[in-house]
Every structure is written in structure tokens, then in C-alpha cells.
Amino acid sequence: MSVLTKLVILFYLCQSVVGDFCLKAKLGRYTSEDYDKVDEDLAKTIDGHVDVSFADLDTTEMTFKYNIYGGAKGCNKCGIHIHEGTTCMYHQIVKGHYWYPGRDGKVEDPWTEKYGAVYSTNPSIGDAYGSFKIDAGLNYMANLRHAVVLHDDNGDRYGCGILEFVECPAHTQNTQNTQNTQKKQKKAKKKKNKANKAKGRRRKL
Ligand SMILES: [Cu+2]
């Protein structure tokens, strides 16, 4: 297999992992003033981010990736979900899990352990990294600006972030490559111009 073939395969593999339309939520404390169950110690340390990606604009299946730092220690399958609200500030507006229940309202809530919407940490460090695929019946645009909520062992909320537009890692790489190519082309053009100028000068001489 040539290096080029390998690169092409790697490119498509990366794409299928990363997806084409991405959202990112920076995790911070669940600020909700109208909620008194936040573990204040966790609220101080919680950091990290959640990356959500969709293969296209219509699909409702997303890859949900989390990088949690300073979270609840020793959390065994604690909840991590996208919620109905578009803020972390008011508990009443953050509301419950965000999914499309279907016309008859019978589609099950996918933001549960059964569908993998959990994270676990070890007893000494509250960090967690992982990902799961989930279909909440809502597409990329429908999820924009929605709150991602982190729960502790008791189910209480302490971490939160808002999903915002972000360029997918694969896209960023492509843009960088394009920029590099453009830079190279510019450099080559400059060199050519210089050479031509030198030629012109020589001709004049
Ligand atoms: Cu939740």
C-alpha cells in the first residue's frame, strides 16, 4: 500500500470518527441560582469540554465525546446529558433531558445509562474521557445552544456548558492545509516575480 493510499484511508477514518458538523460546550459550574443542590466543591473544580458531531445536517445520530477534569470523584456511571434549556443560569429553564419523543410521545428518553449517556471517574481523580453514539431524534441545528449537564452520584447537577458552533477538527486540519498550500503558492509566486524582476534588470543592463 502506498503512503498516499494510507493517508487517504486515514483521512476518511478520521472523518467518520469526527463527523462533519460539530458543536462544543466548555464545561463550568451549574450556575443556576434557583437550585441549591450544587456541590460547591465540585462547582469550583469542574472543567473540561464536550464535543458533539453529526455526519450531516439531517441525521439525528450524534457522537458525544467528553473530556471532564475536576469532576465528581469515584463517579460510577453518572449522568451526562443534553438538556432542553439553552442556559446554565436558571434551573427552571435548563429543564430536563432533550429528545424528540415522536408524534405519539412514545419514543424512550435516550439520555440514560441504557444508551450510554454516562461517565465514570476513579476515586482519586475526577477526570473522565470517553464517547458514545446517541440518537435523540434531533439534528445538528436543533442541538445548537443547548445545555450539557453533568450530574454527580446523587443525580444532582454541578457541571454545565452550552453547545456552540465549532469547526470540526478535520475541517480545521483541512483549512490549515489549504492555508499552508496557499502560503507556499504565494511564496513560489514571490520567488518567480523576483526572478522575473532580476531578469528584467539584467535585460536593462
Ligand atoms: Cu441531565
Image: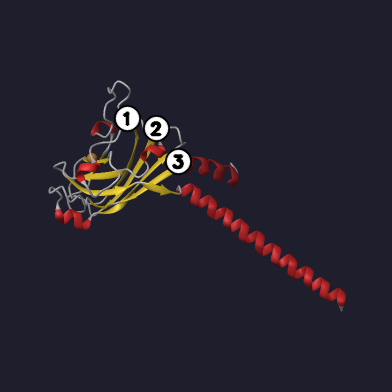
The type of residue carrying mark 2 is Thr
Is the residue under label 3 in contact with that under label 1 (CB below 8 Å)?
Answer: no
Residue positioned 21% across, 57% down in the render: 45
The type of residue carrying mark 3 is Gly
Towards the viewer: 202 or 165: 165
Residue positioned 37% across, 42% down in the render: 144
Q: Residues within 10 Å of mark 3 (few under 14, many from 20)?
A: many
Find numbered disc 1 in the image and state the secondary structure of the residue it sits on: loop
- Give the mark nearer the N terminus: 2 vs 3: 3
Residue at the limit of the structure toward the bottom, as seen here: 205
Q: Determine which residue is flagged by label 2.
A: 60
The type of colouring in the image is secondary structure
Does residue 14 lie above or below 138 as drawn?
A: below
Q: Determine which residue is flagged by label 1.
A: 100
The C terminus is located in which quarter? Answer: bottom right
The N terminus is located in which quarter? Answer: top right
Q: How far apart in space, not on screen, are marks 1 and 3 (Cα)?
A: 22 Å
Which mark's residue is nearer the viewer, 2 or 1? 1
Which mark's residue is nearer the viewer, 1 or 3? 1
Which mark's residue is nearer the viewer, 2 or 3? 2
The x, y position of residue 197, in whole percent, is 78, 71
Q: How far apart in space, not on screen, are marks 2 and 3 (Cα)?
A: 12 Å
- Position of residue 60 in the picture relative to residue 28 (left or right): right
Residue at the limit of the structure toward the top, as seen here: 104
Is the residue under label 1 in contact with that under label 2 (CB below 8 Å)?
Answer: yes
The type of residue carrying mark 1 is Tyr
Q: Determine which residue is flagged by label 3.
A: 19
